[in-house]
Image: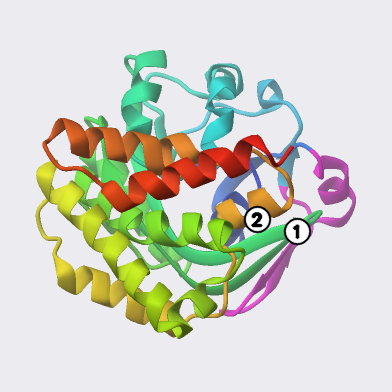
Amino acid sequence: MIYGIIGTGAIGGYYGGKLAHAGKDVHFLLHKDYQHVVDNGLQINSCNGSFHLDHPFVYNDSRKMPKCDIVFVCLKSVNNNLLKELITPIINNNTLVVLIQNGIGLESDVQQIFPGLSLAAGLAFICCAKTEPGIVNHQCYGSINIGNYSCPDESLVRSLTEDFKDAGIEACNMEYNEARWKKAVWNMPFNGLTVALNTQTDLLLKNPATMQLVRDLMMETIEGAKACGVQNIDASFADKMIDNTIHMTPYSPSMKLDYDFHRPMEIHYLYTRPIEEAAKAGYQMKKLKMLEAELIYLNQNNR
């Protein structure tokens, strides 16, 4: 299968790099560091074993890329207005587009732009960052859940999962809404609180007051998910997410990095949309709505 990576940042660089390192046919779209990667290749510094791609297939224009069987969209969701321009040249009637993005409601909005497109959600549980050209730093974890949204060919979704496993990536297929909301259980507390309190994940959990706040926000997310019909999610999942975070490397989530580098934060899909969906289903995320207001304020005064 031919893979296309739209947005070769930390996530696209890591998962695309792992697939390419395993011998898969992977094509990367880059922007700022295109020439650096052409000249120097792509370096993945990973806790699971580092490697270097000497001459990856890289492009600065998606119109130069081949048609792809599977496309990973790894852009920040604030840039989804660019999707029509970026992915139209590389898709055909059978292409599966996987949105490896954070939040709730992404696929339904993209489906309105591409009514017949096969879509899936990619939910990455990983700590990684790219803070310099052509170098991805993978600190810990790295699994990915795939939730099929509108692909009629289940075998294609299964093939993707198998290719991930062949590349040494823990991957599984999961019901779409369950996959999206379970990732939100981690994202909604940690992304926003690290920005609002100017801290990292480990410090939030070392302080009893903020650890309790993290758990309260997780439970609001879980109750919102249940109101929206999600099953297989309860308080034990919050406890698991907290325990996993205690044992991982101190980490600044993507929203904290965006804030620190004065980039727009992904507030709409990470906060506004799930809060709205839960409210429609009869559940009010009161503490998360307060956090959302703080993030909107910080976002507007961080340019």
Whichever of callouts 2 and 1 sits on the residue coming sooner in the sequence is 1
Q: Is residue 46 magenta?
A: yes
Q: Nearer the viewer, mark 2 or mark 1?
A: 2
Q: Is residue 236 above or below residue 270?
A: below
Towards the viewer: 226 or 213: 213
Can residue 128 be seen?
yes
User: Secondary structure beneath disc 1?
Assistant: strand
Residue at image x 81%, y 40%? 32
Q: How many marks?
A: 2
User: What's the magenta region?
Assistant: 32-56
* Rendering coords of residue 179 (x, y %): 26, 51
Residue linked to disc 2: 257
Q: Are marks 2 and 1 in contact (CB under 8 Å)?
A: yes
**Can you tell which quarter of the image residue 197 is in?**
bottom right
Residue linked to disc 1: 131
Q: Is residue 184 above or below residue 208?
A: above
* Rendering coords of residue 51 (x, y %): 69, 71
Residue at image x 40%, y 60%? 189
Which quarter of the rendered picture does the C terminus lie within? top right
Tell me which amino acid carries mark 1.
Thr
Give left or right: position of 249 versus 257: left
Tell me which amino acid carries mark 2.
Leu
Give left or right: position of 56 versus 230: right
* Rendering coords of residue 215 (x, y %): 30, 69
- Marks 2 and 1 sit apart, C-alpha to C-alpha, by 9 Å
